[in-house]
Image (cartoon, rainbow, N blue to C red):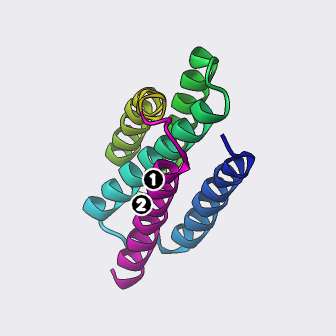
Amino acid sequence: MPQWIGWFLLLNLTTACIAYLFLYPRRNLIGFHLGMNIAMAAGGGLALGTGVILINLFPLHFIEVIISTALLGMVAGGLFGALFDYQSVLTGYINGLMMGIMSPMVGAAASEGPMFILFIELFILSCYVLLLTSAYRS
């Protein structure tokens, strides 16, 4: 597995931090439906990307990867959901947990090459861009 794939983990975390800092001043202008979608996409997307990357970098450490990915997804979903209301916190938390548990399994099943990881990263980054543009327009 190429070692440059580990840089995608840093890219995911940086994108999530930038998105959080972008959304924080606009949190009162965003409705609860969009807030719930933001919490689900942020927690689930970060957990999905992290799980696929980590299971490809550390293929024999299933338990450690699943625990760390689930915790990261829960924290991210909870933090993004806390910007809006309690229902968004709970939704982001649970979605981050479920994606954190399932994403290492997806990454292990699709460990043929870096093309799948590139597709997942492109998908996650486009979701962040879509969420930020919809939050900007609301």
- Can you give x and y, in whole percent of width and height, for residue 77 in the image? 47, 44
Residue extending farthest to the left is: 33
Q: Which residue is mark 2?
A: 123
Q: Residue at x 40, y 29 (%)?
A: 102
How would you rate the neighbour count of disc 2 (Cα within 10 Å): few for under 14, some for 14-19, many for 20 or more?
A: some
Disc 2 secondary structure class: helix
User: Residue, x 36% and y 70% (percent of image)?
Assistant: 30
Residue 136 counted in the magenta span: yes
Can residue 29 be seen here? The reply is: no
Q: CB of mark 2 within 8 Å of CB of mark 1?
A: yes
Q: Considering only vertical position in the picture, is 132 above or below 78?
A: below
Toward the viewer: 97 or 89?
97
The magenta region covers 110-138
Image side of residue 115 versus residue 91, left or right: right
- Residue 51 lies, with reference to residue 121, above or below; the image says above
User: Residue at label 1?
Assistant: 120
User: Residue at the location (51% across, 69% down)?
Assistant: 23
Q: Main secondary structure of the magenta part?
A: helix
Q: Amino acid at mark 2?
A: Phe
Residue 26 location, x and y as percent? Answer: 48, 74
Label 1, secondary structure: give it.
Answer: helix
Q: Residue lying farthest bottom? A: 137
Residue type pointed to by label 1: Ile
Q: Is residue 52 above or below residue 20?
A: above
Q: Position of residue 83 (x, y in %)?
A: 48, 57
Q: Residue 43, can we see it?
A: yes
